[in-house]
Image (tube, grey):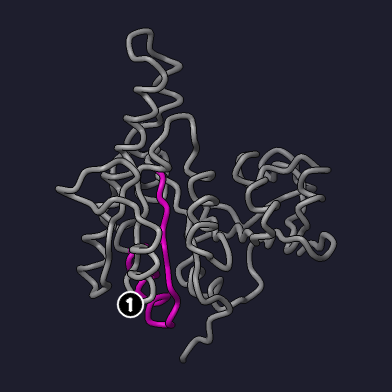
Amino acid sequence: MPVTPAYKRVLLKLSGESFCRENESGISMSELTSIATQVKEVVEAGVQLAIVNGGGNILRGKQFSESSETIIPSTAHYMGMLGTVINALALQDALESVGVATRVQSAIRMEGVAEPFIRRRCIRHLEKGRVVILAAGTGSPFVTTDTAAALRAREIDADVVMKATKVDGVYSDDPEKNPHAVRYTQISYNEVIEQNLQVMDAQAFHHCMEHQLPILVFNYKKVGNILRAIAGETLGTRVSAEGKATTS
């Protein structure tokens, strides 16, 4: 059945962990195929889609720098950014194997495998129906991929930042520790701050709040959820300027 998208242009944030199985590292072909299949449905619905992916399944720069006396923190963060490029190239091939036109743009120049990130070129690719995978964060160390996603979403004039996670949304407390924790279906930026809830890192969150860019946190592991999120169905947690907190 045809889907009517609720958004024209979307920035989808995928963690590095989405590329591997639970409690594993590296790249899982089954996980990659699942993501590619869901993304294809989104593209076929007519949505312009950009993706920012993490690299934690390959290497986390912050953790690596904290555990090493040999590699300085900035180098470790650059190594982490290169991990996002590995994931982006894997996702590109997975998408093209199912017939989705794709471009990888990197904030660190490496023309042999990816285009440099150029805002106008990125938007032109989106307008032509290509999925653009934005790798290497912002190209600078000490910037999370959450913040890179928020900044890129602003640059390309996305309608929403969709943060794909392995949980159903934003909870009032850690549901694994507190059985009375409730999931919000929607909540305002100010309420997130008042309750000290973890939606994105602080810098990324404030970029979205300052420019009233909605954030949708949802569980991509449920097959079809990415398309349902694109269609505007009520799932996960929507964070925006309007409305008071409501729970499921």
Q: Is residue 31 left or right of residue 3?
A: left
- Toward which corner of the image does residue 133 lie, by quadrant? bottom left
- Residue count near mark 1 (Cα–Cα under 10 Å), binned few <14, some 14–19, many ≥20: few
Residue 216, percent from left and from top: 61, 61
Give 139 or 135, whichever is nearer the viewer.
139
Residue 103, percent from left and from top: 27, 62
Give 175 or 64, whichever is nearer the viewer.
64
Q: Residue furthest left?
A: 112
Q: Residue at image x 48%, y 62%? A: 156
Disc 1 target residue: 128
Q: Residue at image x 61%, y 76%? A: 232
Q: So how many labels did they put on this image? A: 1
- Toward which corner of the image does residue 120 lie, by quadrant? bottom left
- Please say whether residue 142 is one of the residues in the magenta stretch: no
Amino acid, disc 1:
Lys
Quadrant placement of the C terminus = bottom right
Residue 82, percent from left and from top: 30, 37
Q: Residue furthest front?
A: 120
Q: Is residue 237 above or below residue 8?
A: above
Residue 51, percent from left and from top: 41, 58
Magenta residue span: 34-54
